[in-house]
Amino acid sequence: MDWGAIFSNAAVELISPTTAAYALAALGLAVHFGYTGLLNFGQAGFMALGAYGYAISILTFGFPVWGAFLVGVGASVVFALILGIPTLRLRADYLAIVTIAAAEIVRLLFTTNTFASVTGSANGLSGYKNEFAALNPLAEGSYGFGPFENNAYDTWLRIVAWSIVILAALLVWQVMRSPWGRVIKGIREDEDAVRALGKNVYAYKMQSLIFGGVLGTIAGMIFALPRAVVPSNYQTTLTFFIYAILLLGGAATVLGPIIGSMIFWVLLSFFSGFVARAVEAGWLPFMTAIQGGQLRFILVGVAIMLIVIFRPQGIFGNKKELAFVR
Amino acid sequence: MQPTHTAQRYIPRMLAILFVTLLAAFTMATFSVSSAHADEVGTEYDFTLSGNVKFNGEALDGVAIAVDGNGYTADTVTDAEGKWAIGVPEKGTYEVTLDEETLPKGVVVAKGGNVIDTEFGLTDRKSVNFFLGEGTRNTVSFFDQFVNRFVNGLNFGLLLALAAIGVSLIFGTTGLSNFAHAEMITFGALMTLVFSVNLGLPIWLAILIAIALSGMLGYGLDAVLWKPLRRKGVAVIPLMIVSIGLSLALRYLYQYFFGGSTSQLPGAGMTDIKFGPISLSPIDMASMGISVVVLLGVAYFLLRTRIGKATRAVSDNPSLASASGIDVDGVIRIVWVVGAALAGLSGVLWAYFRPGVSWDMGFQMLLLVFAAVTLGGLGTAFGALIGSIVVGLFVELSTLWIPSDMKYVGALVVLILVLLFRPQGILGRKERIG
Amino acid sequence: MSANAGPQGSPAPLEPPVPTQKPIKTTGLHIGEAEPGCAKVDPILVVDNVRRTFGGLTAVDVAHVEVPRGAITALIGPNGAGKTTLFNLLTGFDKPDDGKWTFDGRSLAGVPAYRVARMGQIRTFQLTKALGLLTVMDNMLLGAKGQTGENMFRALMPFLWRNQEEENRAKALDLLTRFKLDTKKDDYAASLSGGQRKLLEMARALMSDPTLVMLDEPMAGVNPALTQSLLDHILNLKSQGMTVLFVEHDMHMVRHIADWVIVMAEGKVVAEGDPHEVMKNPAVIDAYLGQHHDEDIGEDLGAETENVSAIKELLDDER
């Protein structure tokens, strides 16, 4: 068995743009769920808006990178308003159902053949990377070492992706230790109490929904840059994976989502690599390679259950500040 | 379902064809667009999609089939034996389209539409078959279509209701929004498949066994997972996330054992019988009949039996019910068993309605079930029934105006609009919402 | 006897607790006879025809009532009288079917709860709403009004709000010292005892310098020793110029500190007056004796009106 390949493939995930995208999306969910107590199950919809907003702006309208970025962010602000206006006054589980429905609406609208000329329907979109690559200041060549060695484009992408993640983490950290964050955390504990103290709870929840949603949208753009935009990537399962990451790291922490994403992807890659090779080597005679691939999803599901039941504060959460919405 | 080819449906098709053509040109794919002979297309690839187009045992020659997916497109026509095959570069999900224009006059795709999404299972070959039936195109009047869709929508709404009542009762008694209900739906269909197709039992017996097993699954889940968690005092939101984890694990467990393919239950694709403008298969009629009888039974249970009344009391106010001497845990156990059995039955009917049994069929329906429950008012069993019928009708009727691949969009938009104007749902009580 | 049944099942003290200091009673608050709905010399809160129904049950139906400024007014009545519902209506936490009410001459009908609070009418809750996973100090700071740093964008620039934060912190510490919670300031509020949470909630309400403090059952679930200090604190509010309106269902508890008592039963104001006079009112005795039989079930189960309606439905079912 080629342990070297398994380990190096797993190590690649540590700083891959996908890991960065999931970390950022999970950070957005931390703002929603961990800090504010909003049950957003539509993070996949925010990500889809980012990815499609960016790709369509460049492919159909020929926008520059910054214009495409703003289109994606703008779309997600509008999306957050549409989600928030009917639901933020209602009980928490209504938001869950509406966000999950809205994310599916977004995905189905991007999948339908009706708008195929713009969205590419089920095949999605590709060929929007040149504009981003053109901004690359790095000369052609290879950068990094070992499993982290990449060509100029991939290195540039990693630098940008992780810079955004770090910037966003600092932003969340600063805003959560400010009086604004105090109100937000108060809302998580008991919104009536905060309302009784003269805070406009509805406005704060809306701000939080937009803030976390925009982080999810930017995550969607990062997610789209190393691959094509395909609607089937933005299913509800994506949101569930991000919840798994968030719960793994700790819901009301800044570092949790980031480290959680790294652990999630490294373990997932290691596990699939190991199982695939174990099947090849005939160690698991009862399993086919495809079944090995499905095994990891089963494990993600089981992991979500176990974390929630036995370590609800996650890896980085403080047991005392059991930051979990009740 | 009787396909209808009006101008409304024609436009998206045109767009799709246009798009496919463009894409083909773009990728410089060089497939002969109108190959008259039926040799395999894409033989250079390892994986093959194939099928056999027959009507009443007679092979149909020259029917156009197109495959689209994973950035790859190809098309072919059937040979004199009605056979076709298209090679594809990788395993994955493909959209296979049968061009109904190329079918002989009087023959249409009877069930499941002329577009099938298919996914490779464990083998390198995957057969895709369309259900053909007698029918005419371009001649159905709007009114006839409306009536037909209405009946279909009612059928769909009733099977949704079977699942939705379980979701609603579980929510009412335990506060849990059970995402794993999707897998309880799939479970019923999968068990029916196992006992009828794999073990060769008669279908009615297979269905009864599947429902009984579903009830046992509900009992088991409550005993092993939910009851201990309630004892532990785990709050509602963490419970919901646990149900999401469970849903994910079960869904991929199904895929692990049953693969990604779609199988048909015995009797699926029976020829429709015409009643004036309405065309229904015997299965559709049986499905509606069973739904109505079972729903009446559930209504009787809730309204007239002591346990049913206790269930509603717990649903109304668990602590008060417990204070009045009702065995809350016992009621919740019954709710899980009944809810899971109803979900299993709903899964069987859903397998005939779609048609087909697949590992994620319940999850495809889950959101509509939630929409139905929310529309009716969270936690009210009869609201769930009304919500389901509204959603079922809306999904089917909306295809008269919007492309059928967006039919779920309409139902979900209605959900959001209803919440905007009547947040408590159709039957919900206003003061229940914080 | 019936009125003495302690809330949350805690044994009622034999002697109702009395404040340690001798309260100075404010008198001469009303104009004319002390009857339900009588006019006050200087009302701060005026309620007209406020009605709220749940399903078929009328929880509150108050024709007219005035709350005197600068005094301690107790709102008493048996369980299910609609006291908390009226509180929720007056503070914007619930919407009445009908009716209007003014605070300091400004109409409050349709005004959302947070604006009511900003106007200077601050409330506490029957089931204490200390924010458990925030520290005691953060709980206090949350009470301060007009904070620059509570704007999302200004929150990113600490130099804009740091000074204000320090001022609020000093004020909070001062209040915490008065309420004897200063040693707990860095603990999570969840770690406080029930009585300490009541104190914290009251102290937090004072952070915004309110003109009217509305306390919903401040003595419920608090041990007798702390009850005394709570009574002292309520008296202090008055001496600092604030108006206090508090809900209590034990009428003996209010005798020592209240300047004025409003009695509710079955959603209506049935009596008003000086605490000693009002106790002798036959309508009050009726109200307390008449409700005794359905009190036992409703006791521990949260909002009273919901229980009553739920029980009625359950009874209908059994028939």
Image (cartoon, helix red, strand yellow):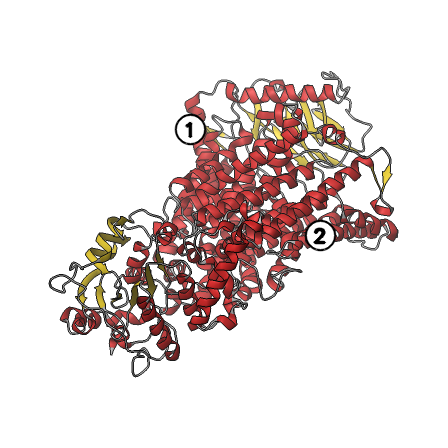
- Residue at point 40%, 48% (across, down): B377
Foreground: B84 or C52?
A: C52
In percent of width and height, residue A297 lies at: 68, 50
Labels 1 & 2 near each other (Cβ < 8 A): no
Badge number at residue B147 = 1
Q: Which amino acid type is marked by label 1?
A: Val
Asked where in the image residue C224 lies, by quadrant, the reply is: bottom left
Residue B162 placement, left or right of B356: left
Q: Is residue B332 visible?
A: yes
Asked if badge 1 and badge 2 are on a common chain, one would say no
Return the chain for callout 1.
B
Helix, strand or loop at mark 1: helix
Label 1 neighbourhood size at 10 Å, few (<14), some (14-19), many (20+)? some
- Residue at point 78%, 26% (across, down): B42
Of the 4 image quadrants, the one containing the N terminus of chain C is bottom left
Q: Up-down: is B227 above or below B80?
A: below
Q: Which residue bears the numbered disc 2?
A: A264
Q: Up-down: is B89 above or below C60?
A: above
Asked where in the image residue B115 lies, by quadrant, the reply is: top right
Foreground: A146 or A193?
A: A193
